[in-house]
Amino acid sequence: MSKTTRLVLILILLGACSLTVLCGGGAYFAYRSLSRSTTSGLEFLPTTAPKEASPQGGALVIYGDLPPTLDPALVQDSTSAEYVVHLFSGLVSLDGDLNLIPDLAERWAVSADGLTYTFTLRPNASLADGRALTAEDVLYSLERACSPQLRSPVALSYLGDIVGAEAYFEGQAEHIAGLAAPDAHTVTIRIDAPKAYFLAKLTYPTAFVVDREQIAREGEAWMRHPNGSGPFVLEALSRDRIVLVRNERYYRAKPALARVTFITRGGDPVTMYENDELDMAAVGPDEVERVLDPENPLHDEVHLAPELSTEYLAMNLSQPPFDDPLVRQAFAQAIDTAKIAQLVLKNTAIPARGILPPSLAHGAESAALPYDPARAKQLLAQSRYGSASALPPIALAISGTSGHMPPVTRAVVSMLEENLGVALTVEQVDWPDFLQDMNKRRYQMFMAGWIADYPDPQNFLDLLFHSASAQNHTAYANAEVDALLEKARVEEDAAQRMALYLEAEKKIVADAPWIPLTHGVNVMLVKPYVQGYRASASLYPWLTDISIAQ
């Protein structure tokens, strides 16, 4: 899912880059904000109630962002997913080690041909209000996510392997042919071909179960107090805080935490942590050297872990000058990702090895185009434009509303100016609008991030670069790449499947629809009394692992 708010918005809050060698004087670019709306799809209360005394189990206070949506069928970003994975559940889930585990389904079986999955629901599975969950609730939720009325921008990306899902999405069928409920506790799903990653796709929010009775009764207002099936329930939703409380009817082991408060009003998380306003806080580049200093008392409270994420610069191949591959390759070789990771982000990221994070690439050699300013100039000169002065105006879109240039953006703009003589206009767009504009391929050039929904190369390469994918935001199309990705979908041998993905990655990187910049490293401060925290490479309902030492 898109990771921009988890990475880029943090950088915005950290202010301008202090490395003048990378940031430049700022005289060569124009900067304007295109904020058009606030968070969409939700209604936030203007004020928030004071924090109440916590029931047994304790309370956790952490920093958060306002989500664009709490509707599982519409989630396409990590901010929304942070809340949704705790409020709702699906047939299967991920644990802290990103292993696939049973969730609403207590078990499943796969047919010998790999096409039919049969799930048996837990007999005690229920919604937060106590209503028992049945197979019909699962089928309703999957069909709702794929419905032509909802027009989810992500549904087919995660559920499109189900026979009949696309026809239903296009309004050509009354139901999804591949879904059935033989009885109240059994769900069968038939897919179009045997695919090793299909079960993992069902951990994505589009497959989560929602309350069909509440939606029928309340319409769009249902998200104000969703009656979910997850380990927590939404208690309060305002512009300065979001509060989750333990679901006392949760069908699996109940969370130890009674209450979790996300502070969303703004402020510096590390400062708030030091002032005992937060129990946990993400550490940004400006603070990382200080907190990692062995002499600093905070040093012993730092947790580090690599993420399955990639921050990238994307170019729209349908818009000039990025319809010329030589221009794209020139831009790629004009950007020093090592300096961005080490100097700008101060080792809170590593230089991108390609599109796939290192652990998903299984030790393969780097696929990234090397930093080579001289070669970059040659490529630009060989393009049909011939020089930077002949390029059309170029606008770089980033997410946010701060009006400040994030350090990574500033570094990229400076490198392109210094190494190619290219001046960019930077446009800042509010996050919900940014997501919509990406989906509609409105941007000539944009900066964003992607964090794995499930630990499989398909989630990066096929989902983002196949020419027919809805998540292909750059209009990239390469018949050879499509063929490799389609072959990898049904390859049963794990080593051969990986080889196909690595070959596809090399071709994509050489075509340069993206310039992979960095892979994230999660740096988190955690109070000593917070027990059970494990930094994970991706998103899962991690709050269920947390307890407060009494």
Image (tube, grey):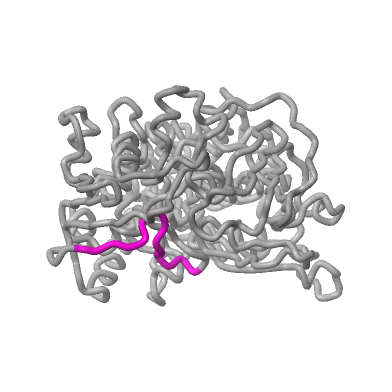
The span picked out in magenta is 97-110
Q: Among all residues in the image, which is located at the extreme left?
A: 113
- Camera-side residue of 197 and 418: 197
Q: Where is residue 8 in the image (x, y as percent from the top left)?
A: 60, 47
Residue at the (74%, 31%) spot, across then down: 48
Q: Is residue 369 visible?
A: no
Rendered image quadrant of residue 453: bottom left
Q: Is residue 311 above or below residue 422?
A: below
- Give yes or no for residue 109 being in the magenta stretch: yes
- Camera-side residue of 398 and 159: 159
Quadrant of the drawing holding the C terminus:
bottom right
Residue at the (16%, 41%) spot, across then down: 177
Rendered image quadrant of residue 64: top right
Q: Where is residue 31 in the image (x, y as percent from the top left)?
A: 62, 32
Q: Is residue 528 above or below residue 390?
A: below
Q: Where is residue 147 in the image (x, y as percent from the top left)?
A: 29, 31
Residue at the (56%, 61%) spot, across then down: 520
How would you classify the magenta stretch by its main secondary structure?
A: strand
Residue 64 left/right relative to 446: right
- Camera-side residue of 495 and 256: 256
Residue at the (64%, 33%) spot, across then down: 237
- Camera-side residue of 536 and 235: 235
Residue 534 left/right relative to 372: right
Rendered image quadrant of residue 174: top left
Q: Can residue 292 be seen in this view?
A: yes
- Give yes or no for residue 293 being in the magenta stretch: no
Q: In this view, does 328 lie above or below 544?
A: above
Q: Position of residue 544 (x, y in %)?
A: 58, 58
